[in-house]
Image (cartoon, helix red, strand yellow):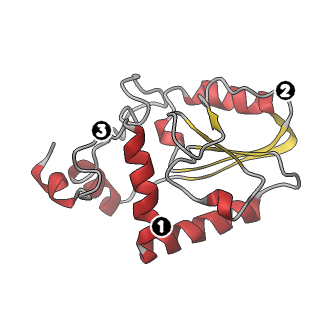
């Protein structure tokens, strides 16, 4: 790992793999304990909630480090890892729902972790009712973010890549 990246790692997660479920739980604690981060997540969550269609069958993919369920109590929380406090362990490419039974699928910083985006979109289309939505908050690409992704972020950054990711770990392969 790059020295600069190592210097900015949070002490609670420094010795853990990003694919370790304990890392996800610690990230939740970090987000909730830092007022600035919590405020950003609250802003994102309000945008997600405002974009939801009517209905209360909403699945969140990658819920482990977040707290959207505190604002949306009927939320079906899920994670690709077995994480305490999550309702379902779900692979976004093969979801355990009957056809047309979800009102929405939401996610924050998850889409770029899905190994086969086409498979996910097909699966979401199958699970969503007519008029259902996929609502997400994703990292954006700017000159500043490219520098951060290349120098501080543990995930690979391949701007010319496609929407498939070689499977390595549930989170590390993003």
Asked if one can make out residue 161 in the rendered structure from this viewpoint, the answer is yes
Q: State the residue position of label 3.
A: 17
Report which residue position mark 2 lands on: 99
Which quadrant is home to the C terminus? top left
The disc, 3 or 2, on the residue closer to the chain's N-terminal end is: 3
Q: Which residue is farthest left?
A: 3
Mark 2 is surrounded, within 10 Å at the Cα level, by few (under 14), some (14 to 19) or many (20 or more) other residues, namely few
Marks 1, 2: nearer the viewer:
1
Instruction: Tell whether 14 sits left or right of 155.
Output: left
* Secondary structure type for disc 3: loop
Q: In the rendered view, would you say 114 is above or below 72?
A: above
Report if residue 140 is visible in the image: no
Task: Write the residue at 53% across / 43% down.
Answer: 84
Q: CA distance from mark 1 to mark 2?
A: 35 Å
- Classify 10 Å Cα crowding around label 1: few (below 14), some (14-19), many (20 and above): some
Mark 1 = which residue?
Answer: 32
**What x and y, as percent, mark residue 117?**
57, 30
Which residue does the image show at 84% across and 26% down from the upper left? 99
Where is residue 20? Give x, y as percent: 37, 37
- Gap between marks 1 and 3 measured at Cα: 21 Å
Q: Are marks 1 and 2 in contact (CB under 8 Å)?
A: no
């Amino acid at each position: 790992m790059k020295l600069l990246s190592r210097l900015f790692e949070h002490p609670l997660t420094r010795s853990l793999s990003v694919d370790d479920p304990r890392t996800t739980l610690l990230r939740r604690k970090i987000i909730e304990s830092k007022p600035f981060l919590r405020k950003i997540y609250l802003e994102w969550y309000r945008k997600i909630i405002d974009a939801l269609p009517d209905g209360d069958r909403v699945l969140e993919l990658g819920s482990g480090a977040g707290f959207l369920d505190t604002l949306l109590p009927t939320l079906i929380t899920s994670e690709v890892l077995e994480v305490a406090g999550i309702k379902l362990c779900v692979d976004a490419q093969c979801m355990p729902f009957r056809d047309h039974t979800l009102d929405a699928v939401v996610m924050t910083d998850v889409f770029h972790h899905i190994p086969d985006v086409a498979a996910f979109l097909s699966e979401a289309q199958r699970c969503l009712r007519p008029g259902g939505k996929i609502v997400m908050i994703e990292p954006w690409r700017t000159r500043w973010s490219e520098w951060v992704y290349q120098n501080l972020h543990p995930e690979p950054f391949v701007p010319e890549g496609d929407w498939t990711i070689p499977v390595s770990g549930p989170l590390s392969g993003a």
